[in-house]
Image (cartoon, rainbow, N blue to C red):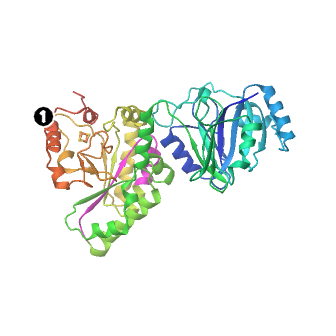
Amino acid sequence: MAVKALSYIGVNSDKFDDWSIYSQNYLGMQKIDRGKDILSFRMDDQKQRLTITGEKGDGLGFLGWEVENKEDLEIFAVKLEKNKIVVHQGKSSFSDKRFVEDLIYFDDPQGNRIELIYNPMIDTDPFKPGRPISGFKTGALGMGHAVVHVKKIDDLIPFYTDIMGFKISDYSHTPISLCFFHVNGRHHSLALFGSGRTGFHHFMVEYNNLDDVGQGYDLLQYKDNGSLLTEKIIDNLYNKDNISNINVSIDGATKKTFEGIRIRSDFDKVINNTSKLILKIKTKNKKKRPIFTALSLIQKDNVHEAEQIMYLCKKMGFDELCYQVQLTGWGKKEWEDNNLKKDINYNNSNKKLFEEIVQKAKKIDFPVKVIEENLLSKQNQCGYPWNTPYINTEGKVTPCCMIPDPNVLSLGSIEKTNFNKIWNSKTYQDFRNDIKSHQLREYCKNCYRSRN
Ligand code: SF4
């Protein structure tokens, strides 16, 4: 009789949109359609690993622990009841909800809901990650680990060791009491954090490949430019006379679509801050410049909102809107592969949609362009390294916004070096010369029609 792995975790939250974006786009889990009242994700061939219960709060919903044999459930139930723990038998409808063959459930001495389950169901469809990752390390090691806050560790250790049969891997007493437990080869599948309060501290999932961790971290660093517009920056831009053009990407007309595409952005902030900036610069001083251009990168996820985007941009006060209807890889092979799936394959049928939008825009006096071809060629070379440097939120400079990731190419950091020095540096000049002589770096080839 033994618990062999952490099978699944339930988190209490009703913020389905936030969890949906976080779990799929950052962690790379696969969202499963289970109706509107619950959110579930897969991490491997198991039908369900992470569940967002729909209950308000941000605490632990439940921890599901897998046992070796079906009879173990009964043996555990007897042992728990002998220790005055009230045990509930899971009905078949409940087992179906958890996608397991059988289960019992009860609370640990601090009230954390524990479910002991037998035989989690396996899906026949292959796992489809929410972002390109090599997969999660699960199998015999289970889903990962969970850490819970506890008032007093000593009140729970006997429960987890003597009754549940967990083994202690490690512990510490100062500055804070911590106790780590293992049930298989993973160093710990559960840890108690003696913070003096109750609640869920964190859960951990593991990837097969370290690069997947790094890429997830990079995604989490990203903030959309419109989200970062503060009153100070708005004033600063307002007082500058030499800005000719301000471009803002508007890739969705609704929060769900926009934030699904512009990961970690805040739709409301982008719309409000940009509208405020346009209003301040345009109406108060009647300035002709800068020209405000909305850029909308059309893909399968937002093409249904293309017309709404046009009306939104007009309402926000933009001078013009440019739809870009072709996706490239922007310097990364895996993005290229991913973007191929999202590209709308601009053709006669969707071309008609954009022609109609341009006509509707004319009626409200709003200039709209459709950039049908954004791939460069030997004759039509890239001009970005001469006029459009990109500076990320950490101050790292790359030659263009197509390479926002300084791990692909970093030309320096304005935190350490004066921008003029970076702009005129040998590294920057060499990069420009490579573009001029058509000696394209690998990450630039995606922007060109022919990769040679
Ligand atoms: S060709 Fe290179 S520098 Fe130009 S936009 Fe593409 S990635 Fe950036």
Q: Which residues are magenta?
A: 287-309
Q: Position of residue 158 (x, y in %)?
A: 74, 42
Q: Residue at x 29, y 34 (%)?
A: 446
Q: Is residue 262 visible?
A: no
Q: Position of residue 87 (x, y in %)?
A: 83, 41
Does the magenta segment cover residue 293? Answer: yes
Is the residue 274 above or below the residue 436 in the image? below
Q: Which image quarter is the C terminus in?
A: top left
Q: Residue at x 65, y 26 (%)?
A: 122
Provide the residue designation for mark 1. 437
What kind of element bears circle 1? loop
Classify residue 33 as left or right of residue 246: right
Does the magenta segment cover residue 40? Answer: no
Classify residue 126 as left or right of residue 305: right
Q: Quadrant of ligand 1?
A: top left
How crowded is the residue under tag 1: few (<14 C-alpha within 10 Å), some, or many (20+)? Answer: few
Q: Position of residue 163 (x, y in %)?
A: 77, 37
Q: Quadrant of residue 405?
A: top left
The amino acid type found where label 1 is placed reads Ser
Q: Position of residue 442 (x, y in %)?
A: 26, 32
> Among all residues in the image, which is located at the extreme bottom?
284
Q: Quadrant of residue 86?
A: top right
